[in-house]
Amino acid sequence: MVADFNVAKSPKDIAFYASLLAAAFPICQMMTIMYWSRLSDRIGRRPVLMIGLLGYLVSFLMFGICRSFYWALFARCINGLLAGNVAVIKSVFAEISDDTNRPRMMALLPLMWNLGSVGGAAIGGIFADPTHQYPRIFGHMEIFRVFPYLLPCLIGCSITVFGLVMGIFKMEETLVREPASRTMDIRMSLTSPSSSTSTLATESTQLLTEPAQPKQRSMRELLTPTVVRVMATNVVMGLGVAMSDQAYPIFAASDLSDGGLGFAARGIGFSLAVSGVAVMYLQLVAYPKLERKYGALYCYQRGQRMLIPVYLAIPFLSLLTSRLEESIDANTHVSTLPSWMSHALGEYTLWLLLVLLLLARTTGTVLAFTSINLLTVNLAPSKSELGFMNGIQQLAMTTTRIAGPIMAGVIWTWSIKHSFPYPFNSHMVWVLCAALTALSLRMSHKIPESVNTFAAGNNKRDTADDV
């Protein structure tokens, strides 16, 4: 898409502009995410979620009809400014759950995120420029010739419209406001000049009708060494994942001479779609069993251990592809196999290895992100601090989604413009992802095992006992 805008001076600069486009959303989201969160506390979760979905709908249409880089950048900014759903949906999940199922409910969030990320990328790659990819079906539709990226955006709009309809007609408000206390009415009826016990009666009635409010801890009290360690490893791990998420489509689309795979948009979309199938099984079936048996901290560390070798291995697929093509071309005249069969075997080998690596990458990402969500919830000393913990984590993840794409694009562009040896060639961005994950893994070993326990569930305040 960025290449079609003709904004890059050379093909090697495309990654830089693609990174700017990717970073625009989280930058703008960070500016307004606290505003939408506070607004949901005043007017409710449901209306803010509906506003967010309406913002997605408008920005998707704008993005689909853009014909310049700066128009696309503007559409991404509008999308980010109106994207308050991420923070608000965590509050919804917390409000519809209890101590027995809150960790499981929070574990559903990365499932939705992974399915959306993988599915969205796959839809974009498979349905982009349909007049050229599927000329028999869309070749006569002028609108898709003028706006080659409109079709995947329309598919996204249809999904958003479905969410809006379900939200309007099916979703109930989860923010339950306490009914106005009847204390004042009782106080007025009991208080009179002739009543010698009015003050005592009023105070006793107030104690019975108004629950004791837990004292809010200060930020200094909440940011314990354990919390700081968990958030620090979250940032480092998230930065590596954000860089790899941006680096993979660039790597897949780049020429073999630049250390890529030379895939077209359809090939990139299919490769990402494979991960979407794995996410559902891992999140719904495998992860709950692993977490129940070993704990969230162990799963977090295991996921990072899987990601490190995957990051280091992915860029070698380009070298393998180049060597396979050279070998096939050199042996075509002496081989007993037809040339088309030799090429097919080479392509199948590439796809087999690629799918295995992507499945391993998806497994590691699911283990890491699901576990860090559970660890964040477990860190809250009481339910009244759940919002603070989720807010800190969301701010940390937004920061990595800003820095990760930009870093990946800049490093990839720099590495392929120079002829430096390994690891400063096209492998550099992947080596850095592995190094960040290794650092995060080492930091996680200083986290105590107590984070596997939901602290708020062990710190209940019984108002009746207090009274």
Image (spheres, rainbow, N blue to C red):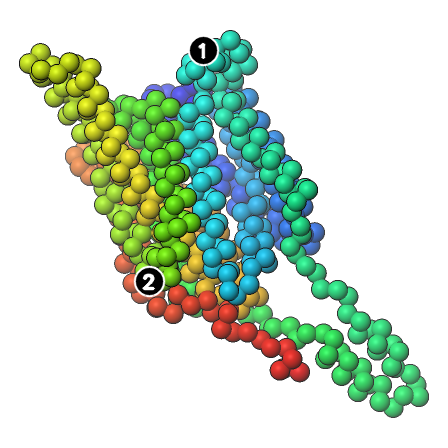
Q: Earlier in the sequence, mark 1 or mark 2?
A: 1
Query: Which label is found at residue 136?
Result: 1
Q: Residue furthest bottom?
A: 196
In the rendered image, which residue does mark 2 sit on? 294
- Give above or below for 155 relative to 462: above
Q: Residue furthest left?
A: 334
Image quarter of the N terminus:
top left
Q: Nearer the viewer, residue 180 or 75?
A: 180
Q: Percent from the top left, x then y, of residue 145?
A: 50, 13
The amino acid type of the residue labelled 2 equals Tyr
Q: Tell whether 255 sits left or right of 221.
A: left
Q: Neighbour class for label 2 at 10 Å: few (<14), some, many (≥20)? A: few
- Numbered circles on residues, count: 2
Q: Percent from the top left, x then y, of residue 42?
A: 69, 54
Tell me the residue at 26%/38% (across/down).
356
Q: Tell whether 170 sits left or right of 307.
A: right
- Give above or below for 371 relative to 460: above
Q: Neighbour class for label 1 at 10 Å: few (<14), some, many (≥20)? A: few
Q: What separation in Å lies between label 1 and label 2 (alpha carbons)?
A: 53 Å
Tell me the residue at 58%/50% (across/down).
88
Tell me the residue at 31%/65% (across/down).
446
Looking at the rendered structure, the secondary structure element under dot 1 is helix
Looking at the rendered structure, the secondary structure element under dot 2 is helix
Q: Nearer the viewer, residue 95 or 390?
A: 95
Tell me the residue at 56%/33% (across/down).
159
Query: Which label is found at residue 417?
Result: none
Q: Percent from the top left, x then y, of residue 25?
A: 50, 38
The amino acid type of the residue labelled 1 equals Arg
Image quarter of the C terminus:
bottom right
Is residue 393 visible in the rendered structure shown here?
A: no
Q: Percent from the top left, x then y, of residue 32?
A: 58, 46
Check if mark 1's residue and mark 2's residue have beta carbons within 8 Å: no
